[in-house]
């Protein structure tokens, strides 16, 4: 027989644990690249997917606490470069790579996140020109959302004072980069829109890298700009820098200084314009007065002296007045004679005599009606009392008062007239004048 080596028997768990230790100690933390497929997002917030190339594949997972740091949306088909550690899920004996970082190959994660958000918001219509509002011609109060300590705010205030020193500025101080900057910017926009009583809002900061400007690429800032009821100017970075805020805002200024120049016109330009318009109005009024004066002179030459016409009309008026007085007097006399005749006729037919006679007749009829009603009621009452006595005499209850009773068989309630209608030991009920008895038949006679 062949000699067999000494057997060392391992359980499945022991073998899996040994493989796990060997893999984790050999590979540890690694960089790996591949294509994402079979991406799943369960309610737990973790990301599960397969990382593959032309010949092989490996399961990958990014746990929820790490997925929050991804700058872009992971999607099927993306070619990514990942960093993590190799591990084994012992319950299934499957090895996988647990990732702490991922970036798209060939394009930065921030740039990809920018393009993804830009495409999504554009599809929703946030960039449409139809929803953008014009700036006020001369704002009384300007709201600014930016850092209170940078050169940006100093430059904007200087330009605003130089162009129009009377304009009022309300600053909402925020962080313009770093953790929490996007939330502060969004809160500043909402506050100025609701409580700042401003006519226009400038949101901006100075230039910088894509990472420095990233707060203005956050969805929270874009949503706040879109929801604002106040027109907003985006002034982020330099002229070549573009952010999501630029696309959503009502007006995009290439720089913060340019925003200060766009938001308000120079006072001297307005004064010059007012002077020009005032002079133009004055010349127009002069021309209008000259034309009207010429028209008055032309009409005046065609108008005749009205005094002759007035005298003629006055004579005619006197004639008409005499005729009117005579006709009025004649009519008055005729109407007075007619009124006197009608008055005598009316007095002869005075209805008060007949009314007095009818009142007396009505009084007598009323008395007779009262007497008749009283007599009829007494007669009816006596009849009802007589009929009531007869009805009471015929009532079974009156018979019961004289000592009689009514016996019923139980349980059907048949009124008994003969003894044969009930058996021995049957139950009967006996109705008396007052009360009722429950009895049992012991004997029949």
Image (tube, rainbow, N blue to C red):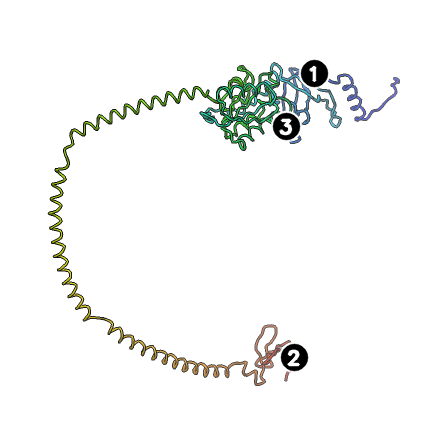
Q: Residue at x 45, y 21 (%)?
A: 267
Q: Position of residue 64 (x, y in %)?
A: 67, 27
Q: Position of residue 8 (x, y in %)?
A: 86, 22
Which residue is more in the foreground, 7 or 385? Answer: 385
Residue 122: tell me if it is visible.
no
On screen, residue 99 versus residue 345, left or right, reads: right
Say above or below: 10 vs 379. above
Q: CA distance from mark 2 to mark 3?
A: 89 Å
Secondary structure beneath label 3:
loop
Q: Residue at x 49, y 25 (%)?
A: 166
Residue 206 badge: none
Quadrant position of residue 243: top right
**How many C-alpha atoms fall within 10 Å of the one at disc 2: few (<14), some, or many (≥20)?**
few
Q: Nearer the viewer, mark 1 or mark 2?
A: 1
Q: CA distance from mark 1 to mark 2?
A: 110 Å
**Residue holding disc 2:** 441
Residue 41 badge: 3
Secondary structure beneath label 2:
loop
Asked if the residue under mark 3 is in contact with the one under mark 2, i.e. CB atoms within 8 Å, the reply is no
Q: Earlier in the sequence, mark 1 or mark 3?
A: 1
Q: Position of residue 90 (x, y in %)?
A: 75, 26
Residue 31 badge: 1
């Amino acid at each position: 027989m062949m000699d067999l080596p000494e057997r060392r028997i391992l359980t499945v768990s022991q073998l899996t644990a040994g493989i796990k230790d060997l893999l984790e100690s050999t590979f540890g933390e690694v960089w790996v690249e591949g294509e994402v497929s079979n991406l799943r997002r369960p309610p737990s917030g973790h990301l599960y997917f397969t990382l593959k190339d032309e010949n092989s594949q490996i399961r990958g997972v990014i746990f929820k606490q790490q997925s929050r740091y991804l700058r872009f949306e992971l999607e099927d088909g993306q070619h990514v470069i990942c960093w993590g550690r190799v591990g084994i899920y012992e319950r299934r004996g499957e090895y996988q790579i647990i990732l702490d970082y991922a970036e798209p190959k060939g394009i930065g994660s921030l740039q990809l996140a920018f393009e993804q958000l830009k495409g999504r918001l554009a599809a929703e219509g946030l960039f449409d020109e139809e929803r953008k509002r014009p700036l006020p011609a001369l704002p009384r109060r300007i709201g600014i959302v930016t850092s209170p300590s940078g050169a940006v705010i100093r430059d904007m205030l200087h330009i605003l004072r130089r162009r129009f020193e009377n304009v009022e500025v309300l600053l909402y101080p925020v962080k313009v980069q770093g953790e929490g900057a996007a939330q502060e910017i969004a809160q500043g926009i909402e506050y100025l829109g609701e409580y700042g009583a401003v006519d226009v809002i400038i949101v901006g900061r100075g230039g910088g890298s894509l990472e420095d400007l990233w707060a203005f690429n956050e969805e929270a800032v874009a949503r706040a700009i879109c929801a604002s009821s106040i027109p907003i100017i985006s002034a982020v970075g330099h002229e070549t820098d573009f952010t999501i805020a630029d696309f959503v805002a009502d007006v995009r200024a290439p720089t913060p200084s340019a925003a200060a120049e766009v938001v308000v016109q120079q006072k001297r330009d307005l004064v010059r314009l007012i002077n020009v318009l005032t002079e133009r109005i004055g010349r127009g009024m002069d021309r209008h007065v000259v034309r009207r004066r010429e028209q008055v002179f032309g009409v005046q030459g065609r108008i005749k002296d009205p005094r002759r016409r007035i005298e003629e009309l006055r004579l005619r008026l006197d004639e008409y007045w005499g005729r009117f007085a005579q006709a009025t007097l004649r009519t008055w006399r005729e109407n007075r004679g007619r009124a006197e005749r009608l008055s005598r006729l009316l007095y002869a037919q005075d209805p008060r005599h007949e009314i007095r006679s009818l009142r007396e007749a009505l009084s007598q009829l009323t008395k007779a009606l009262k007497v008749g009603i009283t007599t009829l009621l007494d007669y009816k009452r006596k009849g009802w009392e007589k009929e009531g006595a007869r009805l009471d005499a015929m009532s079974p209850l009156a018979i019961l008062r004289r000592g009689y009773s009514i016996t019923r068989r139980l349980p059907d309630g048949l009124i008994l007239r003969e003894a044969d209608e009930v058996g021995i030991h049957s139950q009967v009920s006996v109705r008396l004048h007052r009360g009722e008895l429950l009895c049992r038949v012991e004997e029949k006679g």
